[in-house]
Image (cartoon, rainbow, N blue to C red):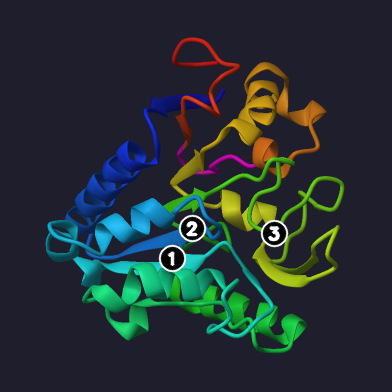
Amino acid sequence: MHTYRCFTGPDEAAGVLAEELQALSLAQEVSHIVLSGGSTPQHWFALMAQPPFARTIRWSALHFWWGDERCVAPEDSTSNYGQAEQLLLRHVAIPAANIHRIRGENEPRSEALRLEAELRALVPQQQGRPVFDWVLLGMGADGHTASLFPQHTDFDEERLAIVATHPQSGQLRISLSALQLASCRRLTFLVLGTDKAERIGEIFTRPAETLTYPAARISAAHGVTEWYLDAASAAHLQGGKA
């Protein structure tokens, strides 16, 4: 069952996410969090870089990981880590050791293996798989999430990290696998914009197993899965749950 919460726009959603991250930082000694890339989290990053959240979030308690990364240098304008660094990380007192970026400049397959080793070394495991405290993901208009694309995703892939190819551009990317993204206590999809409305409508009205959209097929293995939407992306939905 999917549950969702509808916000007036990205600013309201960003405010709620910042408050929730602050609460988590104060509630646990250590939390492992997966961040999404793309344009969706930009308001959230920018808000947390400013007072009061820049001061009130206990940054030393948070470890940041990424759901995926393009195979580019961190200085590249398309780097997911680079965006987070510019909008958030350079502005707050998070220890460098708590930032676990995917090294997009490395050879992709060796980097996927290095990332897997780092995850196993640092993130507490359950049933042989690292378990994140919170995974935040976006969704493309085609239903992809991280770098897992429709018709190109193995939902049973046991590896923690994979090398993916963008089906249109051919660009190589490194992504956490579907099973590893699902290995979490809380999974939040932040989905904004009219171009996502049709896919959201399908996800909330059709059985997940009938859909090819990776975003529809991934849910938290150890907790709650939720969708944070704006009025535009929720245009095909009614009520608060489906």
* Residue 131 tag number: 2
Crowding near the residue tagged with mark 2, few <14, some 14–19, many ≥20 C-alpha atoms within 10 Å: many
Q: Earlier in the sequence, mark 3 or mark 2?
A: 2
Please give the residue where the numbered disc 1 appears in the rendered image: 124
Residue 57 in picture, x, y percent from top left: 18, 60
- The amino acid sitting under disc 3 is Ser
Q: Is residue 158 left or right of residue 218?
A: right
User: What residue is at 81 percent from the left and 45 percent from the top?
Assistant: 150
Q: Residue at x 71, y 66 (%)?
A: 159
Q: Is residue 241 left or right of residue 51?
A: right
Q: Residue at x 73, y 54 (%)?
A: 148
Q: Amino acid at mark 2?
A: Val
| 31 with respect to 128 (left or right) | left
Name the quarter where the N terminus is drawn. top right
Answer with mark 1 or mark 3, whichever residue precedes in sequence: 1
- Residue on which the image places disc 3: 147
Q: Residues within 10 Å of mark 3 (few under 14, many from 20)?
A: many
Secondary element type, mark 3: loop
What secondary structure is marked by label 2? loop
